[in-house]
Amino acid sequence: MSPITTHILDTSCGRPAAGVRVVLEALSGHRWENLGSGSTNDDGRVTDLLPEDSALEAGTYRLRFEVGDYFEDQQIESFYPFVEVVFRLEDPAQHYHVPLLLNPFGYSTYRGS
């Protein structure tokens, strides 16, 4: 499993959000560097953003969730074309799970386990 994982729950219907493209980036100086990407599976999870043996460094990271396409595919109007979650990774030896709770007009996130 990747050292950084995520999942999306569509709280408007109480189901995982499948097929959402997710991009992982790291802040390098003043620029974002692409580290990996994937799409959520049927359970709304992305577990392979990075190879399992990836060496991370302490720093600032960003997950970009392409949620506009997800809602458009369902013919649901959505306020957000994408969601970006920026977080600080302090201990590269730990696993970081960053879930997204999503609906067409709002979202929240937290550090999961």
Image: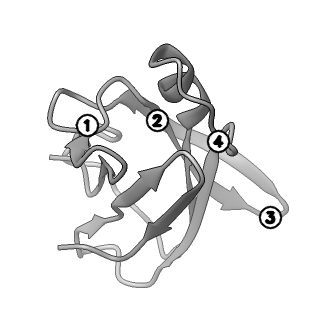
Based on the displayed image, in which of its 4 quarters is residue 41 positioned? top left
Q: Which quadrant holds residue 90?
A: bottom left
Q: Give the amino acid type for the residue marked by disc 3 in the picture.
A: Gly
Q: Earlier in the sequence, mark 2 or mark 3?
A: 3
Say if mark 1 contacts mark 2, CB within 8 Å. yes
The amino acid sitting under disc 4 is Phe
Q: Of label 3 and label 4, which has the lower sequence position?
A: 3
Q: Secondary structure at mark 2?
A: strand
Q: Amino acid at mark 1?
A: Asp
Q: Earlier in the sequence, mark 1 or mark 3?
A: 3
- Pointer 4 residue: 82
Q: Residue 16: x and y, percent?
A: 23, 41
How many marks overall? Answer: 4
In percent of the image, x 53 and y 18: which residue is there? 75
Determine the CA span between mark 3 and mark 4: 24 Å
Label 3 neighbour load within 10 Å: few <14, some 14-19, many 20+: few
Identify residue for label 1: 48
Q: Position of residue 53 (x, y in %)?
A: 21, 48
Q: Secondary structure at mark 3?
A: loop
> Looking at the image, which is closer to me, 77 or 64?
77
Question: How far is mark 1 from mark 4, CA to CA?
Answer: 20 Å
